[in-house]
Amino acid sequence: MATYKEIKGTQIEVLASDPSNPVEGQVWFNSTSNVLKGQSVTSAGSWATGGSLNQAKEQNTGISVGTQTAGLLFGGDNPSPGGTANTEKYNGTSWTEVNNMNTSRRSGGGYGTQSSAMSGASFAGNTGETNKTETFNGTNWTEIANLNTTRAVGAGAGADNSSGILFGGSTAPGSAQAINESYNGSNWTEVNDLGTARKGLSGIGTATSALAFGGATDPGAASALTETWNGTNWTETGDLNTARNISGGAGADSTSALAYGGYTTTYVAVTEEWNGTNWTETTNISTARSSGGSSGTATAALYSGGQNPAGKLTTTEEFTGAGAGQTRTFTDS
């Protein structure tokens, strides 16, 4: 049954400030700014500027976790050409530096939350690929059991640091790998490999419902391949519309995801949404770039840092999916 508000709408109120939680269809007059406003829903996803990182950095693809309002970005390449141990937390508005990692690293895989994160399958500063992994408990980083295979530029998926997978990547001298390892809270175990060896790929999801997309195959061409993980096997599925390497990615599980930015033969701004079967292009990010830190879900994603011809970036962008509430100002034009 329709509600009274759905049939008749809501009364136009005169308010000194915008309501904190307006409902769809609500209209009000803001007496402070002297404008008429209303609440609608977005018809398409959109990107907006968020708080800037404290330290410009790139090569953070795969080592940023959490949500749009509680993100964690760690490592990266600054100063160049080495890595950093720097860690920053995001509260939905601004970034704050917190305790560093034990090992400086860049171009790695990671998963988890702001208070329970995993980092591995990365370069260790200037010393090349490493099998070292670390977990974060919201305050400190702790070194744990090493990966079985030393590699870098891998990707990861996991709900928290108690379980997850790290897959793909490259071993010296840069050969793409299909290796997939699972963590049980104590040790890493090799499990079924990716269908196609790739490095610089993106990963989202959990230990039992993950998505791997993009990256580069040997000898280095950008890939559009997408594979789903069901906890046992990888299955190839619908390709990205734009092949890309070292892109951003967000998503809670293999049924929905977002791919954005990356590098083909140039830096791209293209954003695509995954519905469990196909990729569809949506609103581009504002700044074309690759190698940024990405986290969140398909409807509330975060992309921070990265690089483009301007150099290393501090820029953060926030994605809001279609159907989210949006306050609009009415004008006479």
Image (cartoon, rainbow, N blue to C red):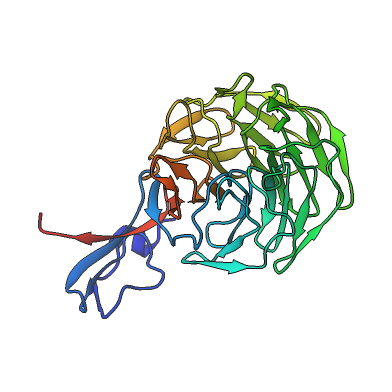
Task: Determine which quarter of the picture holds residue 52.
Answer: bottom left
Residue found at x 42% / y 59%: 50
- Residue 156 higher or lower than 235, as above or below: below
Name the spot of residue 280 as percent of width and height, x first.
46, 31
With 96 as the anchor, is 156 left or right in this view? right
Residue 296 visible in the displayed image: no
Name the spot of residue 174 as percent of width and height, x first.
68, 28
Q: Tally the numbered discs.
A: 0
Which residue is at the front of the view, 264 or 116? 264
Residue found at x 18% / y 69%: 35
Identify the residue at the far top of this view. 219
Identify the residue at the far left of this view. 333
Name the spot of residue 333 as percent of width and height, x first.
10, 54
With 100 as the anchor, is 318 left or right in this view? left
Residue 225 visible in the displayed image: yes
Which residue is at the front of the view, 154 or 279? 154
Name the spot of residue 125 as percent of width and height, x first.
67, 48
Residue found at x 51% / y 59%: 55
User: Image quadrant for the N terminus?
Assistant: bottom left
